[in-house]
Amino acid sequence: MQKNILFVMYDQLRFDYLSCAGHPLLQTPNFDRVAAKGVRFTRAYVQSPVCGASRMSTYTGRYASSHGAQWNGFPLRVGEMTMGDHLRALGMGCWLIGKTHMKVDAAGMARLGLSPDSVIGARQAECGFDVWCRDDGLWAWGPDGFYDEQRSPYNAYLTSRGYDGENPWADYANAGVDGDEMATGWITAHAGKPANIREEDSETPWLTRQAMAFMDQAQGPWCAHVSYIKPHWPYIVPAPYHAMYGADNVVPPVRDACELDDPNPVYAAFAGNEFAKLYQRDEARETVIPAYMGLIKQCDDQLGVLLDHLAETGRDKDTVIVLTSDHGDYLGDHWLGEKDMFHDPSVKVPLIIYDPAETTGGVTCDALVESIDLAATFIEMAGGTVPDHIVEGRSLVPFLRGETPAWRDFAISEYDYSCQSMRAKLEVSPRDARLFMVVDRRWKFIHAEGGFPPMLFDLDNDPQELRDLGRSGLHDDILALMYDRLGAWGRRMAQRVTVSDGDIMARQGGSEGVGILHWLWDGSEVSQEALSRYRGPVRQRYVDD
Amino acid sequence: MQKNILFVMYDQLRFDYLSCAGHPLLQTPNFDRVAAKGVRFTRAYVQSPVCGASRMSTYTGRYASSHGAQWNGFPLRVGEMTMGDHLRALGMGCWLIGKTHMKVDAAGMARLGLSPDSVIGARQAECGFDVWCRDDGLWAWGPDGFYDEQRSPYNAYLTSRGYDGENPWADYANAGVDGDEMATGWITAHAGKPANIREEDSETPWLTRQAMAFMDQAQGPWCAHVSYIKPHWPYIVPAPYHAMYGADNVVPPVRDACELDDPNPVYAAFAGNEFAKLYQRDEARETVIPAYMGLIKQCDDQLGVLLDHLAETGRDKDTVIVLTSDHGDYLGDHWLGEKDMFHDPSVKVPLIIYDPAETTGGVTCDALVESIDLAATFIEMAGGTVPDHIVEGRSLVPFLRGETPAWRDFAISEYDYSCQSMRAKLEVSPRDARLFMVVDRRWKFIHAEGGFPPMLFDLDNDPQELRDLGRSGLHDDILALMYDRLGAWGRRMAQRVTVSDGDIMARQGGSEGVGILHWLWDGSEVSQEALSRYRGPVRQRYVDD
């Protein structure tokens, strides 16, 4: 039977801001609907807690240091294969509706003579997707121009709906009003205002309609990457969502004074940055979090629209639903804002998968899942065998069948802060501005390049990750184990992408059949046939006897 | 002034089979001529002791696990940059005359729509070189056909000179005669016979003439990679070289019974393979080594021809001469044959560089040099800045100037034996069939994936590497240091090839100018200009006041 994949990604959605994941106040019945039928993974980690790097890992199925696009705006090198390349080879279309954060490797394309106007070039430029609609959703602008030089289909839509100006995304979708003045969502104090836009014209419903339009015309097995910008900042949401939650609905921050007492210097640098300082303020949290919850509530309502549409068109029978995010949001937890580090609010994401062909439903799975596993999962769903010399993730399909496969002992995440203020503060070179997380069932370990001490959290005894044991001297055995794991992972075979293990196994037996015979003394070691082409009468003689 | 680079590579030339390197019996006056004017590097290590992987590292300037072409016949992934790409961008042509062992990534080329008939495609297929003449020099054949499916320019030459048959390389250049029968050089017992060919038509003089023909027409500046197949096996050489050395001229093997007493299981597997068994026989050593010395002597004579030609044409004034090899040859040392492991006879290579523009001459340098340093060196010689986010090697130019730059503390080499018999013997998966060497000024450490113990040699007290201290329990501190180094190296930033450190430094300062302002509470944190595009009167109103 044909199987489609509706691969929905939200941006900056925390793992725990869903009712099915235990949020005490926010109700997300549509996420819960999917979770009730499928498998909810409770320990899904992104390979890097920042949009661009995380997405390039999800799309390629490869760790950030394998594909090299380690931060926002770092181009994904030309030729790097993505889920689109793998799925199309299996006869499944792979379409983009929304955001990827892909930056094209223009220099590499030029070097190889690839034009972005060609089919091959366009796929290279679009991270392997065919584009139904790409909108990365950050149409910021300033004195130096636009942050993103691409054309915004969403802005074009707003214009078509009568919103005026060059950038209605900024003026309407992401701004409220303050008397007669625009009140931009970039100013956090405005987060509680309703966005000055019809709700139906805001980003999440617009993209939902794009997704439905895609599905209504799609032929044949397809994977549709429906990739919402929200609940990513700017934090501002249209009515009625702006008013659904207030300061009273804000859960207390997960933080403790002990975290700032003799902190690891790397953590201290992150906790001292501009985002952290903002979210250390209660007024910021109490303003932003209700808006953030409203944005998620809108996402949940629009997910309901999508699910209903699937059911109405019969596509619910043959469409796998995948719900996830590219990273979380600290929201003041651990005295931090934004994402970027490896506490659970940042590095752990929601992941819910429902395959109507599988009977297991309504269960949770606490295996150590990595976002690179999705590419492998989709390849298996499309009927393929995971090319594990390229795709480093592993298929989650066994879990969807209720099986308990042998699984990895630890998950990895990486972070490159070379473009951020912390690099200068820590006085490291760009290539040393890198962090690595190793997490297993009990311990979370963080290594920083540049000679800093490690961080270590005992998730059994300190599930909120408040006490860094990295310099305690109490767990040197665990630190040694984690360094061993990181070392083994660092040596992983990530770049032998042109030869599979199967190719190698097929080569066993050597080159005897093609006459490579450099271990012979007198020729008696091999069959006469192996040497037959080297034997025969001397036809011309150039040497003295 | 225009500067050319004559980049000569021999194949399987040991570091110590040159008179300037101390060989007690073999005289190589032309190598010595270059060494007497230039710098001879006494600790130059290849990144992998096997043709294909070593060469891909030399050409890309990147470690084997960075470029992924880790063994012979593993295609170099499309888009991987080589010295050709770097040098041409600096206005220096980069030409191939001889062997590369490059295997094209045909699947990757097809995926990107690149035709090998196009200029870009041909360079991708030829490891970034423009091809004056490519001949990989292994025209073996057997019941299953040719080892190398390409066309051999050398065979075409032999045919033009009247040698008959489909494969005169096999029938004449690499065979002697035994009565009325051909005596193939694949049979080691024949190594002492003269090859049944006019000396002038044998491979080394032929390629020398190709190189001179290239230089005679070249418009500068150029880098010419003159890449000889010899003294690589089949070990057979035309007269008079076949008779220059005999069993009396064979130096004793560097080996000791203690090496086979409780050996490391990985070493034991290598010492038990077919090559090792052959070279453990004195008769094999005593037959092969004189032929090997004759092949080197012929290379030296032909180097003299090249040097004289440079002088006669005036090109000696502006042409840098680089002499090196892709790996060594055990020749029975350490009970081993061939290359593949990390004792000095295998992993260390000759490296002599003479730049007529530099005054330092006739000196040796014992810095820990890696073959990836050549790409960086050539880029600097061509007037460029080494793109150290791509090229992992470091320029050797300071050494040529007599400077003593801060330098690496250890060198790395890798070996993938997944396609060899040792893999099955050691019962490891293809991806665990990998070895890593870390060598510093005193210690050589070898790590094997797959759970094996490490090997360790004390080069100060055991310069011949006869006593493996890896399991002695005496040097756990050194082992820990080496594992730390290997771990740090494993995490090196090897794939961020689309963004340089300079690009990152230029990005410092954030995205404020393009309106990414997500750390503001009330806007007072930034200039009014930064927010100017977000401010202004409400032009349309969609929200209730």
Image (spheres, coloured by chain):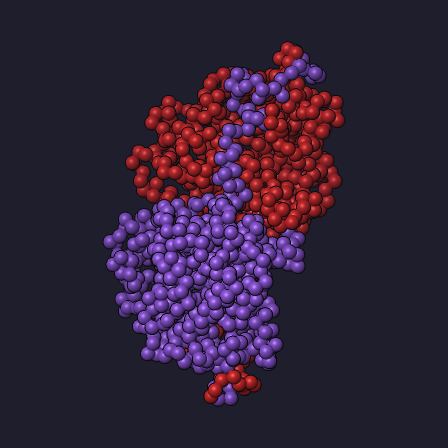
Chain colours: A red, B purple
Measured from the top left, where is residue A246 in percent x and y? 55, 17
Q: Please tell me which residue is depicted at 36% across the width and 31% down the height of the picture.
A: A264
| The quarter of the displayed image where residue B43 is located | bottom left
B230 to B219, vertically: above or below: below
Measured from the top left, where is residue B244 in percent x and y? 39, 78
Q: Please tell me which residue is depicted at 48% across the width and 64% down the height of the picture.
A: B311
Measured from the top left, where is residue A418 in percent x and y? 47, 35
Q: Please tell me which residue is depicted at 65% across the width and 27% down the height of the picture.
A: A203
Q: Tell me if residue A531 can be seen.
A: no
Q: Please tell me which residue is depicted at 44% across the width and 56% down the height of the picture.
A: B355
B223 left or right, relative to B241:
right
B345 left or right, relative to B304:
left
* Circle count: 0
Measured from the top left, where is residue A44 in percent x and y? 50, 38
Q: Tell me if residue A114 can be seen.
A: yes
A99 left or right, relative to B138:
right
**Camera-side residue: A384 or B44?**
B44
B295 to B413, vertically: above or below: below
A459 left or right, relative to A135:
left
A4 to B140, vertically: above or below: above
**Camera-side residue: B223 or A73?**
B223
| The quarter of the displayed image where residue B427 is located | bottom left
**Camera-side residue: B77 or B194?**
B194
**Camera-side residue: A406 or B441?**
B441
